[in-house]
Image: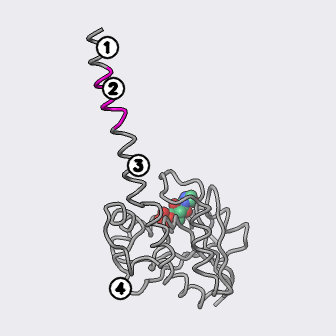
């Protein structure tokens, strides 16, 4: 087997324990694993690319053959530019398969020399996704064990209730002010 460079692309918004599990597994198989964060995603992310880059760098600091980078545009073009021979993607459940198969076949059409390799994260992470982590955290639920501690901290900082209260206050004040303004205006 050619153990060249592999690319593990994704949004990583935020990185989860499932992502980290896959990175660790991938790093044992490939000579070098480049975790590549998509920069031009259409989704409005919770964490900036710089924040995701910093989190992933910290989380993989002990894995010497893992590098974190970002990319724009077509993933296969970026993969070629770094001489990657393989795309690594994680499959948690059958429900992932359809989308992943479609993407793998499209990527093969775009660049036939690049192979996609699917790996399964540990079964304890089979239900963990960035989207659900964001949803649970935004609703004030616990995400312990689903994301690394550093990510848990960053989520807490981002969703600090003090900030939420401040926001509510800012919204409430102008609304009530507007009502009394209107009353005053009608009287005059
Ligand atoms: O973690 P995600 O959001 O499922 O990752 C999806 C990602 C970033 C791998 C995919 O959307 C992608 O590669 N986007 C870059 C644009 C591209 O190459 N599109 C064609 C893919 S078939």
Report the magenta residues as a range. Answer: 173-181
Q: Which mark's residue is nearer the viewer, 4 or 1?
A: 1
Marks 3 and 4 sit apart, C-alpha to C-alpha, by: 37 Å
Marks 2 and 1 sit apart, C-alpha to C-alpha, by: 10 Å
Residue 139 placement (x, y as % from top left): 31, 61
Q: Which mark's residue is nearer the viewer, 2 or 4?
A: 2
Q: Which mark is residue 124?
A: 4
Front one among 127 and 101 = 127
Of callouts 3 and 4, the N-terminal one = 4
Q: Quadrant of residue 17?
A: bottom left
According to the picture, the residue beneath numbered tag 3 turns out to be: 166
Marks 3 and 2 sit apart, C-alpha to C-alpha, by: 19 Å
Is the distance from the Cβ of mark 4 to the nearest ligand 1 atom less than 8 Å?
no
Of callouts 3 and 2, the N-terminal one = 3
Q: Which mark's residue is nearer the viewer, 3 or 4?
A: 3
Q: Which residue lies at the image location 38% right of the left edge and 68% below the top edge?
A: 133
Marks 1 and 3 sit apart, C-alpha to C-alpha, by: 28 Å
| Count of numbered circles on the image | 4
Contact (Cβ within 8 Å) of mark 3 with mark 2: no
Neighbor class of circle 1 (other Cα within 10 Å; few <14, some 14-19, many 20+) is few
Q: Which mark is residue 185?
A: 1
Contact (Cβ within 8 Å) of mark 2 with mark 1: no
Neighbor class of circle 2 (other Cα within 10 Å; few <14, some 14-19, many 20+) is few
């Amino acid at each position: 087997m050619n153990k060249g460079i592999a690319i593990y692309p994704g949004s990583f918004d935020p990185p989860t324990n499932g992502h980290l599990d896959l990175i660790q597994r991938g790093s044992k198989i490939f000579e070098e694993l480049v975790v590549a964060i998509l920069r031009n995603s259409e989704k409005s992310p919770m964490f900036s690319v710089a924040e995701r880059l910093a989190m992933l760098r910290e989380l993989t600091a002990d894995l010497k053959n893992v590098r974190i980078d970002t990319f724009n545009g077509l993933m296969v073009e970026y993969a070629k530019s770094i001489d990657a021979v393989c795309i690594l993607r994680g499959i948690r459940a059958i429900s992932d398969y359809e989308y992943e198969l479609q993407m793998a076949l499209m990527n093969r059409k775009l660049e036939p020399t690049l192979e996609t390799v699917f790996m399964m994260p540990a079964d304890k992470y089979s239900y963990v996704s960035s989207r659900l982590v964001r949803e649970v955290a935004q609703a004030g639920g616990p995400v312990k064990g689903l994301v690394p501690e550093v990510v848990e901290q960053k989520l807490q900082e981002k969703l600090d209730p003090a900030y939420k209260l401040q926001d509510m206050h800012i919204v409430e004040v102008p609304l009530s002010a507007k009502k009394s303004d209107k009353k005053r205006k009608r009287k005059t």
